[in-house]
Image (cartoon, grey):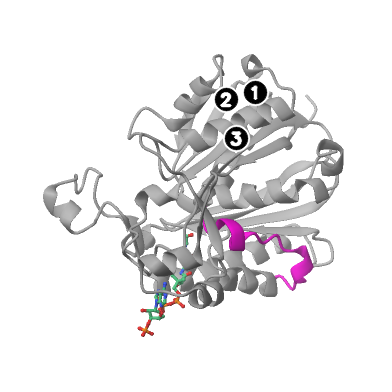
Amino acid sequence: MEKLNAIITGIASYVPEYILTNDELSRMVDTTDEWIRTRIGTKERHILKGEGKGASDLGAPALKKLLEKTNTNPDDIQVVICSTTTPDYKFPSTASIIAEKCGVKHSFAFDIQAACSGFLYAMEVANGFVKSGLYKKVVVVSAEFMSSIVDYTDRSTCPIFGDGATAVLVEPTTEDLGIIDTELHADGVGLPYLMLKAGGTVHPTTHETLEKREQFIHQEGKTVFKYAVTCMADVSESMMKRNNLTHEDIDWLVPHQANMRIIEATAHRMNLDKSKVMVNIHKYANTSSASVPLALADWESKLKKGDKLIMSAFGAGFTWGSMYIKWAYDGSEVNK
Ligand code: UT7
């Protein structure tokens, strides 16, 4: 059998309408637009409003758009993988809810929890399915309703996050394109530094956990920052070395959008000019696992067949990783 590679054949994104600006945040907590822009790099973030909403209300519109854009019959989708840190429910999976909302009836569906590295983890799983030859149309949805777990009285975390979703279609090819190499890591040392303390089996929600506001993100920013800088830069450099790539060979770095200073440190280690770095943290903030594919979606029209991309992410766990892909189509053709 000919060797198969997994390629992205389409991408779509969805962000909710409401925009929460730094100025609005600075009326909610003791912060300033200047602090947020210089320490994080964010100007605004999109927020999902309304009662009874979940991550699937972000993921489903993204998947619907993808199916339309790629002219794909929902009946042909064989696998739906959803990366999310903010599932609609503990069970069933958000992937199965999104599939139902989009009329995808003949696939199996499941979630992946790898925090901000979720897209890369999900893509590697999709890669395995497609490369095996068993599955021809796999969808990766990244849906993050981060504002549902953000404490808007805590100035150290509330400026950081935003809501958003993406969907990508992954299919096989025999061409030398698509996912060429992946390096993923996990180290449980990260647990105390970035977590949701209550609501799981260790600390189920009680009046006490609610009083302590443990239903919201807990982050020790400085420690997470140090790990993020080191791990993102290390894994991106490692990806270059493993594939004998110099900075001249790489067309784009697609970094997780957690902090502009982490992105700059990664690009610096790779010796990459900033013109090759996809940055949209200023308009979406950190959308966890949706951040890397949101950048891909924003840049789709500029991407050319054969472009060499390195995607890198770091998140809670800790989890981190990097993926080297050769882009499979001319984005300008899609967005005419
Ligand atoms: O995506 C998953 C991975 N997550 C990350 O990669 C996030 C990593 N961490 C970070 O990006 C940064 O650590 C933060 C953006 C969270 C914080 O930036 P920092 O430069 O590490 O600030 P800090 O926590 O060391 O705080 C510096 C000062 C403190 O004041 P003092 O003690 O020096 O007087 C904070 O109280 O800034 C203060 N501060 C703020 N001031 C204005 C913290 N948050 C704010 C705020 N507005 N929102």
Residue type indicated by callout 2: Val
Q: Residue at x 78, y 61 (%)?
A: 244
Q: Nearer the viewer, mark 3 or mark 2?
A: 3
Q: Are marks 3 and 2 in contact (CB under 8 Å)?
A: no
Vertical placement of 326 versus 109: above or below?
below
Residue 278 drawn in magenta: yes
Residue 302 drawn in magenta: no
Which residue, given by chain and number where applicable, does mark 3 sit on?
62
Q: Secondary structure at mark 1?
A: loop
Percent coordinates x, y for residue 106 in the rendering: 56, 14
Q: Secondary structure at mark 2?
A: strand
- Disc 1 beta carbon < 8 A from ligand 1? no
Vertical placement of 91 versus 262: above or below?
above
Percent coordinates x, y for residue 3 in the rendering: 77, 32
Quadrant (top left, top right, bottom left, bottom right) of the C terminus: top right
Percent coordinates x, y for residue 103 in the rendering: 56, 17
Q: Quadrant of ligand 1?
A: bottom left
- Disc 2 beta carbon < 8 A from ligand 1? no
Q: Which residues are magenta?
A: 270-287
Quadrant (top left, top right, bottom left, bottom right) of the N terminus: top right
Structural distance between the alpha carbons of marks 3 and 2: 16 Å
Which residue, given by chain and number where applicable, does mark 1 sit on?
135
Q: Are marks 2 and 1 in contact (CB under 8 Å)?
A: yes
Furthest-left residue in this view: 207
Percent coordinates x, y for residue 257 in the rendering: 58, 60
Say the numbered circle drawn on residue 258: none
User: In the visual, does 109 lie left or right of 90?
Assistant: right
Structural distance between the alpha carbons of marks 2 and 1: 8 Å
Nearer-N-terminus badge (3/1) = 3
User: In the visual, does 191 lie left or right of 261?
Assistant: left
Which residue, given by chain and number where applicable, does mark 2 sit on?
79
